[in-house]
Image: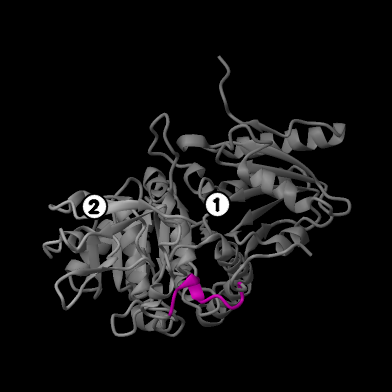
Amino acid sequence: MAKVDAIIGWRNLAIGCAVTEPGSSRNLRTGDWRSQRPVTDREKCIKCGMCWIYCPDMAYSPLRSGYFKWDGNYCKGCGICAHECPKGAITMIMEED
Amino acid sequence: MPERVGIEVSLAASEAVCAADADVIAAYPITPQTHIVEHLSELVADGKLDAEFVPVESEHSAMSVCIGSSAAGARTFTATSSQGLALMHELLFIAPALRTPIVMTVANRALSGPISIWNDHSDIMAERDVGWIQTFAENGQEVFDLIIHAFRVAEDPEVLLPIMVNLDGFTLSHVIEPIEMLSLEEVARYLKPYKPQMVLDPRHPITMGPVGVPEVYTEARQQIESVLCKSKKVITKAWTEFAKIYGRRYKPIETYRTRGAEVLLMTMGSVSETAMTAVDAMREKGIPVGLMRFRLWRPFPLEEFRRAVKGVKVLAVMDRAISYGAQGGPVCTEVRSALFGESDPPQVFGFVAGLGGRDITTDMFKEMVAKAMGYAKKGKGPLYEMIGVRER
């Protein structure tokens, strides 16, 4: 028999292919195909939060220190944060491997 | 038993939805379906039906609302026709995929172009593969009964699929017929309240309609195909139950004067009544002809079909739609494929007739039978041909 790469058998699939576990998208790492990633220079950062506001994938979250933490599990490397940063504190660098 | 009342078939369809106690109706008016939703909006406005009537801005939105309301657990109804059904196309696939048991009547009408508001089956035949259960009514009583039946089948936990009940536009939707109308109480004996298996509820969040990555899409599709095929059992059982309570008996395939018949005419919808008159006339002249019509079209009633044509020599299959560039109309090509591999199958000849509201007369049926018999005798004939098309 040919190899099957299915992750679930159709008889075990929920009715209508529904996802029954709330919030389970958190378990999926959707940023693993990124080709570039943003790096913030905290010397230049003024903690304005533009990167956090503009990020379409909510890959930034505020820290107690006022800076913003970047989460590589969800960042797709679109570069919007770097483009919007008023201080030019964010640089996009190539992902190696 | 309830009394028969003279009523326009469209209005009877609305009354059936009312008797089925639908919760949500989202629809956009289109000829010749208009009277169905118009009357439903009256019934809701007059407080006779306690439902949410959503007057949407297009059929695309109508089906979207229906999917949403059904997903939220509401008994949901809509109706459309022709271009409206075509505009719903992409959503039609989603309703069975989400297992939302929506009931929709389709007042069958030709598709453009040229623009036509009149009856044929080109609208529904373009939606054969969307995963809905599809039934065809022959007369007004059947329209009423099939709508009640549709809610029961669609909402069955073993099914949970949407159903289209087809009725011919104008020739059936706009005629006044004597119909036994069932009341809310009478229908409640047959149709229990809808108990959804999967429901959108903020207290218990789930995701309906997630992305199907290649590792799961095939399995999702297999689920729909399997449920649709298995639904035939529920469909026929629900008809048996219907007969027990209300006395009217329905089957996936209906036959008429097939005893000793060598030739069978095959039809769908209201034109079958004209075909029966034609069969009677031909029988009087000694032509061994009978009639077979599909009431159930999806899932295709393969076993019933093969049984019905056992021993028959010739099939004259009428299509009310063209499948451009194919080997016949949609019904004809499916019939041929259903006979493939059978031992001693009948010879099949296709006839496309009654497009865009052109009348189908008893003479046309006689012509089809005579031609099919002639081709069979020669052992050779066209795969299909147009009947009643003027050349010059």
- x%, y% of residue A50? 15, 59
Check the image and report above or below for B103 versus B275. below
Check the image and report above or below for A32 versus B126. below
Is the magenta region chiefly helix, strand or loop? Answer: loop
What is the number of the mark on residue B128? Answer: 1
Q: Residue at x 81, y 57 (%)?
A: B310
Quadrant position of residue B311: bottom right
- x%, y% of residue B359? 50, 36
What is the number of the mark on residue A82? Answer: 2
- x%, y% of residue B140? 44, 59
Check the image and report above or below for B208 versus B339. below
Q: Nearer the viewer, mark 1 or mark 2?
A: 2
Q: Amino acid at mark 1?
A: Arg
On the question of residue B228 being in view, the answer is yes
Q: Residue furthest top?
A: B392
Q: Residue furthest right?
A: B343
Q: Chain of mark 2?
A: A
State which region is magenta. A10-20
